[in-house]
Image (cartoon, coloured by chain):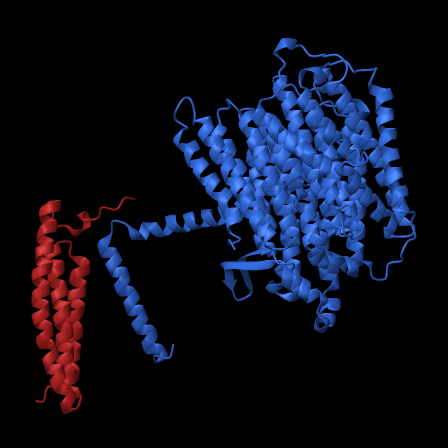
């Protein structure tokens, strides 16, 4: 059975929504970071899916871009984790609702 | 040939050096060394005088112009720093720098021991700088710069003794009233520019433009604006030269030190208005209606101030009103297009009025600052030099034959008579009557000050003659007051020095102004001279009868009371009604209505913003996940809208 391009997009959408839902619903900052990573990878998946749909010349680009994105996302995840660890040390809490310093 | 800008440069250097000295010595208890300060203070005006004299001796007949650089250069307007040295500015500069040098020399004696000695001389030099710029400039903007500069120095020097609030008030009054006139000057420049572009602000180009036959149509089209410009310039002159309606500041300006009154408020600054009229004579020559206004205002001022001078008890106030009255004579002469005669009266008046003021200063000096004439008397025995100087100047101002005032006043009267068939003799009558009153109040001043018995309460042995530094300039000025008039008299081969000097500048306008006027057959010059002398003698006789025996008792302060006060302060009251009250009303209106309206608008929008902000703030703070949710929702909304509208939204 040939893999339909549509299914890949639907899977990517589901992954994205799961990621966003995690970001919105969880209070633990590590889970939020994971949610963000999930949403990012959903986008990668979507691009790969589209590379099947389009003509051959463009499709190679679609295969390559996610590779770059994964590399950059790895670096970004490092930095993000470091920032979060610093915040957690500073605030003594992993609850994102405690991080606001705004009054009112 | 030395450059022209040296003339204003010398006093400028002087004022800067003296200002630095004044600043440096402001901490020390004793103040700066008076010898040094006095030397610098006199040196630079004297250098300016020498420079002027050298330039005047080598000047070509038609004068010359020197442009230093560009001042304002934008598309719609351009002005240069340019100086113009011709017959008119040469005459003015010679006596301005000369008399200024003498009066500053006098000040070294008069201001002896004053705490602000260096400051005073810095101001005086700054004044001389501004005045030379005013006279020397070749365009109206630069003249305006000098015009404002002399106004500033006048303000600084009237309020020189600023410990007394009265002096500060007098200084403020002089400054503010002058500003009212300056509005006229500025608007006049604006009117000229709107008629023919910014090149018209330069005097030679204005004169050339007005007689250019190619510009005939533009000239006729611009006539209403030109008349307006003439009136506005005259309004500026009334402010600076203390004419009706802006004359009330000059008597109050006597709060300043006496040399200031002599230099600024008698000899030089107040004559700037007359100078401006003469400088703009090409413009005024084609505006007979404006000249009529000038004449009427001059006549009214001369008469009013003469009567007001009759009622004063303060020796300096008498001289102040006398100055206003003499300025009225000058404006009358300018009004009948006798610009050369008006400048001649400026010239002689500078000598005799400066001598009178310096004499008054010497009297005050010897009486420890007493200004009330009712507490003087008999000073001829105590201060003979001052008395003789004052006598010379007195004979000059009342127009006694063969003294300088006789020639200039007589010429003005003659030109007034000749100006028109009907109005001429009427003006002549007013001027002659004013001459009688002049003789009365001046004789009264002399009698009360020098004759009779001493009526003051200072020990008589303490009354002393002024030092040499004061008497020397007085004597020089007295000689000038006696003989300055001979510049006009036909000397040698039938040439008239003064008129010849001025004729390259003033001849053309005066000829233009008299085109079409009916020539009046008057009596011969001797008749006018005889009538003028007669007026002076009558005035002296009346004053002798009135005041020689009956001396008013010294009581109260020197301000007139009763109906005399009504007459004297009439224009103060008029200013209150016409100027101060409307301004007060406007400011009340602005405060009560406009301000409240603006505040209402401001509060309305402020409150609106506050309420909205309070509402929206509840979505904003402390709820990070909610904010993220909202931003996702917004993004989804955008996607939906784009999808529904097909991207064409």
Q: Whole-percent x and y of residue B494?
A: 78, 52
> Left or right: where does residue B3 sit relative to residue B374?
left
Residue A36 sits in quarter? bottom left
At x 45% / y 36%, what residue is drawn?
Answer: B19
Q: Considering only vertical position in the picture, is B405 above or below B382?
A: below
Q: Whole-percent x and y of residue B198?
A: 60, 63
Q: Whole-percent x and y of residue B207?
A: 68, 62
At x 9% / y 89%, what residue is drawn?
Answer: A2
Q: Considering only vertical position in the picture, is B634 above or below B471?
A: below
The blue-tinted chain is B
At x 15% / y 57%, what residue is drawn?
Answer: A26
The red-tinted chain is A
Q: Residue furthest bottom?
A: A56
> Left or right: where does residue B385 sit relative to residue A62?
right
> Left or right: where does residue B269 sit relative to residue B523?
left
> Left or right: where does residue B612 sit relative to residue B330?
left
Residue B248 visible (yes or no): no
Residue B545 sits in quarter? top right
Q: Nearer the viewer, residue B398 or A93?
A: B398
Q: Nearer the viewer, residue B594 or A18?
A: B594
The quadrant of the image that shows the C terminus of chain B is bottom left
Q: Nearer the viewer, residue B254 or B635?
A: B254
Q: Considering only vertical position in the picture, is A28 above or below B548?
A: below
At x 14% / y 50%, what residue is drawn?
Answer: A95
Residue B527 visible (yes or no): yes
């Amino acid at each position: 059975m040939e893999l339909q391009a549509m299914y890949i997009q639907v899977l990517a959408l589901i992954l994205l929504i799961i990621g966003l839902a995690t970001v919105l619903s969880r209070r633990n900052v590590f889970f939020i970071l994971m949610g963000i990573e999930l949403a990012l990878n959903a986008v990668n998946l979507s691009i790969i899916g589209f590379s099947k749909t389009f003509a051959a010349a463009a499709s190679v680009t679609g295969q390559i871009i996610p590779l770059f994105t994964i590399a950059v996302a790895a670096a970004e995840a490092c930095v993000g984790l470091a920032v979060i660890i610093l915040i957690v040390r500073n605030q003594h809490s992993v609850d994102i609702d405690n991080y606001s310093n705004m009054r009112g | 040939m030395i450059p022209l800008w040296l003339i204003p440069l010398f006093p400028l250097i002087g004022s800067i050096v003296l200002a630095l000295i004044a600043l440096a010595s402001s901490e020390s208890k004793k103040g700066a060394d008076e010898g040094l300060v006095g030397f610098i203070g006199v040196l630079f005006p004297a250098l300016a005088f020498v420079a002027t004299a050298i330039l005047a001796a080598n000047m070509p007949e038609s004068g010359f112009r020197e442009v230093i650089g560009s001042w304002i250069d934008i598309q719609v307007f351009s002005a240069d720093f340019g100086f113009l040295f011709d017959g008119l500015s040469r005459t003015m500069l010679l006596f301005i720098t000369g008399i200024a040098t003498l009066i500053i020399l006098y000040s070294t004696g008069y201001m002896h021991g004053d705490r602000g000695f260096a400051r005073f001389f810095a101001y005086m030099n700054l004044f001389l700088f501004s005045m030379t710029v005013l006279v020397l400039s070749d365009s109206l903007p630069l003249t305006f710069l000098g015009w404002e500069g002399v106004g500033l120095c006048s303000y600084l020097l009237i309020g020189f003794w600023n410990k007394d609030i009265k002096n500060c008030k007098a200084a403020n009054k002089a400054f503010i009233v002058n500003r009212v006139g300056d509005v006229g000057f500025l608007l006049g420049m604006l009117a000229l520019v709107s008629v023919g572009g910014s090149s018209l602000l330069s005097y030679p180009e204005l004169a050339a433009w007005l007689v250019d036959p190619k510009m005939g149509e533009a000239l006729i089209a611009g006539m209403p604006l030109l008349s307006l410009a003439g009136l506005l310039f005259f309004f500026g002159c009334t402010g600076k030269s203390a004419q009706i309606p802006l004359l009330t500041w000059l008597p109050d300006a006597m709060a300043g030190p006496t040399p200031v009154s002599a230099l600024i408020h008698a000899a030089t600054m107040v004559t700037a208005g007359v100078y401006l009229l003469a400088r703009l004579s090409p413009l005024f020559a084609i505006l007979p209606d404006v000249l009529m206004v000038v004449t009427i205002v001059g006549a009214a001022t001369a008469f009013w101030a003469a009567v007001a001078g009759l009622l004063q008890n303060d020796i300096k106030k008498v001289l102040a009103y006398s100055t206003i009255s003499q300025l009225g004579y000058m404006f009358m002469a300018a009004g009948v297009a006798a610009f050369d005669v008006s400048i001649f009266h400026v010239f002689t008046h500078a000598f005799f009025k400066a001598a009178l003021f310096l004499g008054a200063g010497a009297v005050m000096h010897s009486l420890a600052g007493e200004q009330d004439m009712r507490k003087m008397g008999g000073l001829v025995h105590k201060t003979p030099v001052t008395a003789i100087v004052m006598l010379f100047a007195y004979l000059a101002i009342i127009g006694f034959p063969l003294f300088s005032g006789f020639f200039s006043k007589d010429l003005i009267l003659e030109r007034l008579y000749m100006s028109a068939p009907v109005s001429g003799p009427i003006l002549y009558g007013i001027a002659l009557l004013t001459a009688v009153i002049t003789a009365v109040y001046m004789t009264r001043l002399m009698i009360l000050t020098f004759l009779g018995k001493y009526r003051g309460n200072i020990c008589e042995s303490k009354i002393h003659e002024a030092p040499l530094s004061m008497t020397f300039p007085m004597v020089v000025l007295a000689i000038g007051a006696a003989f300055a008039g001979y510049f006009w008299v036909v000397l040698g081969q039938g040439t008239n020095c003064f008129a010849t000097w001025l004729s390259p500048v003033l001849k053309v306008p005066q000829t233009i102004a008299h085109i079409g006027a009916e020539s009046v057959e008057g009596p011969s010059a001797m008749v006018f001279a005889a009538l003028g002398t007669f007026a002076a003698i009558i005035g002296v006789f009346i004053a002798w009868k009135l005041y020689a025996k009956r001396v008013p008792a010294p009581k109260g302060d020197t301000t007139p009371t009763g109906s005399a006060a009504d007459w004297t302060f009439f224009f103060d009251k008029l200013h209150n009604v016409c100027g101060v009250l409307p301004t007060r009303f406007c400011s009340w209106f602005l405060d009560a209505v406009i301000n409240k309206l603006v505040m209402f608008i401001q509060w309305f929008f402020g409150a609106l913003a506050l309420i909205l902000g309070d509402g929206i703030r509840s979505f904003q703070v402390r709820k990070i996940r909610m904010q993220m949710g909202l931003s996702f929702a917004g993004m989804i909304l955008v996607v939906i809208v784009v999808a529904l509208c097909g991207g064409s939204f």
